[in-house]
Image (tube, rainbow, N blue to C red):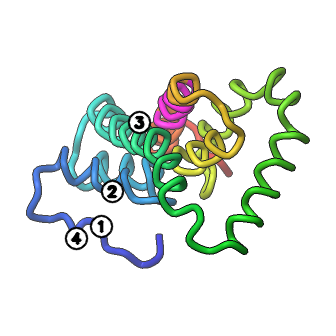
Amino acid sequence: MFDINYIELFKNLPPEIAVMLIAFIPIAELRVSIPIALGVYKMSAAAAMFWSALADIIISAVIIYSLGPIYKKLAGKLKIIDRFFAWLFKRTRKRFYRKYEVWGSIALMLFVAIPLPVTGAWTGSLASWLFGIPKSKSLFYISLGVIMSAVIVTLISLGVFSIF
């Protein structure tokens, strides 16, 4: 992804740390870390899933619990940005809150579980904040989605099934 040589970048680190650092990277996440863990570091499937999913869950928790305070600290610095985001958040929450009440948590979990670019833990964590989903509930459903995604990516990487 983006022509980054992850193996070279983290070559002097223990495999578990390297895999976690790759999984921390937006877009790459466990979609890249699991195949590298299996192919380059020759980790077992369980170890590849564990270290990759752990990293994705950690970064989700960091985003979920820090995004609000960071936004509050930066809010008020540029009035036009504040007005735009206030309008966007109010409109989005008003239009989609009832849908979230019915499908939100499951939809969030499935969104994170789909191993495609921009559908992982980073985006799911940002979306949960945008829609005002309670932090602990967000982390729980995002974690379930991460675990499901780890299983899917591992099975694809092992050739158990293919996407094409």
**Residue count near mark 4 (Cα–Cα under 10 Å), binned few <14, some 14–19, many ≥20:** few
SS class, disc 2: helix
**Nearer to us: label 3 or label 2:** 3
Q: Are marks 3 and 1 in contact (CB under 8 Å)?
A: no
Q: Which segment did they paint magenta?
A: 141-150
Which comes sooner in the sequence, label 3 or label 4?
Answer: 4
Q: Is residue 81 above or below residue 157?
A: below
Q: Position of residue 106 (x, y in %)?
A: 71, 25
Q: Residue furthest bottom?
A: 3
Q: Are marks 1 and 2 in contact (CB under 8 Å)?
A: yes
Q: What amino acid is at disc 4?
A: Leu
Q: Is residue 140 above or below residue 70?
A: above
SS class, disc 1: helix
* Residue situated in front as seen by the camera: 151 or 61: 61
Residue at image position (76%, 65%) is 83
Q: Is residue 48 magenta?
A: no
| Residue, disc 4 | 9
Residue 117 located left or right of residue 62: right
